[in-house]
Image (cartoon, rainbow, N blue to C red):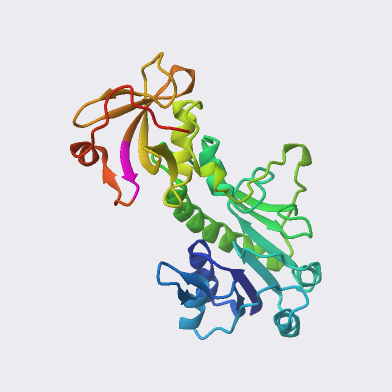
């Protein structure tokens, strides 16, 4: 039986940990996850999804605020694991720890490396309008997401996909690819290839500035942003000096000569907005400031918007 340390935090990591727990040839000796955080309006201290799963199986949980030179790091070393597996852990892992296990340390990363190294690969795949994405199993190195590639598997990105749906799909794909790859790793039969540094791109955390819609961009680019920021935090624009979130939209295959951000068509069931390069976006689900999300026909019942009104950038 191989002794494994698993490091992960969000729900993305949960199916992966579940599969490791259920594998009879593996012992999950400990789980490392981020410290409990305050969540919601009431700021309730909440354990990570990975911690919650580990606790149901009485697996020891370590939660260092910072792993480097911590007591928890020493505990991991003392366990003498055969393999360290990370999946969306969200914290730097010291080189000393990466080199300690017999079979080193591997990461389940939600992109087709070397594309989208970093913290938000799923967001960027949608944001950039990619047609495919996937999972990479790689050896971990000091440089983030730069290790040799052990295995990859891809899936298509549909027009209906957003960050939320891809998060779920890639979580299951990561689980399956990892479990298919582990036997060869433990048998010493796996091959690995170096990443092509000329093809590297990055996916840093989404900033608050990126959440605001720039109507000078094309309807397709804006729609990609809306999908990339769903289910959270959501893309927004400004209407009557207040935030106005747009949760769902559709590119209209028509042209307009009106200024970007201008309402070009409006009736009881639809609202078209001019975008860059003469393109048009149809709003499908919105959320005015201080109100709940609603379909566009519900919103239009109580609004006094009219054609030629403008959303501000």
Residue 133 visible to the viewer: no
- Of 30 and 204, nearer the camera is 204
In the image, residue 217 lies at what x, y percent? 51, 27
* For residue 225, above or below residue 281: below
- Based on the picture, tell me whether residue 271 belongs to the magenta stretch: no
Q: Is residue 306 left or right of residue 149?
A: left
* For residue 9, above or below residue 160: below
The quarter of the picture where residue 311 lies is top left
In the image, residue 273 lies at what x, y percent? 36, 26
Give the prevailing secondary structure in the magenta stretch.
strand
Residue 265 visible to the viewer: yes
In the image, residue 69 lies at what x, y percent? 78, 77
Residue at 75% over, 67% down: 104
Disc tally is 0
Q: Which residues are magenta?
A: 284-289
Q: Residue furthest front?
A: 241
* For residue 153, above or below residue 223: below
The quarter of the picture where residue 36 lies is bottom right
In the image, residue 63 lies at what x, y percent? 61, 78
- Of 113 and 1, nearer the camera is 113
- Of 298 and 170, nearer the camera is 298
Residue at 65% over, 67% down: 85
Q: Is residue 267 left or right of residue 313?
A: left
Quadrant where the N terminus is found in the figure: bottom right
Residue at 37% over, 37% down: 239
- Of 113 and 219, nearer the camera is 219
Q: Is residue 230 left or right of residue 120?
A: left
Q: Residue furthest top?
A: 257
């Amino acid at each position: 039986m191989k002794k494994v340390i698993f490091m992960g935090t969000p729900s993305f990591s949960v199916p992966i940990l579940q599969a490791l727990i259920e594998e009879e040839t593996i012992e999950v000796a400990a789980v490392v996850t981020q410290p409990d955080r305050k969540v919601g309006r009431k700021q309730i201290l909440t354990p990570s999804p990975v911690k919650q799963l580990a606790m149901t199986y009485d697996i020891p949980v370590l939660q260092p605020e910072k792993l480097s030179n911590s007591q928890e790091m020493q505990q991991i070393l003392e366990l003498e694991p055969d393999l360290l597996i990370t999946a969306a852990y969200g914290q730097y892992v010291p080189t000393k720890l990466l080199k300690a296990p017999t079979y080193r340390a591997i990461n389940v990363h939600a992109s087709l490396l070397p594309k989208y190294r970093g913290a938000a690969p799923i967001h960027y795949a949608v944001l950039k309008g990619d047609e495919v994405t996937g999972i990479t199993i790689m050896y971990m190195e000091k440089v983030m997401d730069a290790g040799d590639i052990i295995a990859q598997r891809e899936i298509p990105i549909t027009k209906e996909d957003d960050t939320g749906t891809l998060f779920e799909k890639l979580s299951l794909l990561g689980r399956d690819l990892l479990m298919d790859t582990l036997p060869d790793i433990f048998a010493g039969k796996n091959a690995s290839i170096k990443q092509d540094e000329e093809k590297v791109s990055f996916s840093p955390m989404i900033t608050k500035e990126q959440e605001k819609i720039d109507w000078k961009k094309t309807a397709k680019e804006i729609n990609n942003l809306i999908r990339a920021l769903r289910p959270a935090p959501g893309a927004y624009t400004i209407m009557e000096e207040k935030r106005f979130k747009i949760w769902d939209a559709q590119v209209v295959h028509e042209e307009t000569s009106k200024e970007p951000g201008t309402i070009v068509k409006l009736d009881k069931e639809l609202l078209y907005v001019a975008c860059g390069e003469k393109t048009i976006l149809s709003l499908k689900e919105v959320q005015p400031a201080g109100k709940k999300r609603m379909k566009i026909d519900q919103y239009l019942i109580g609004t006094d918007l009219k054609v030629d009104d403008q959303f501000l950038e």
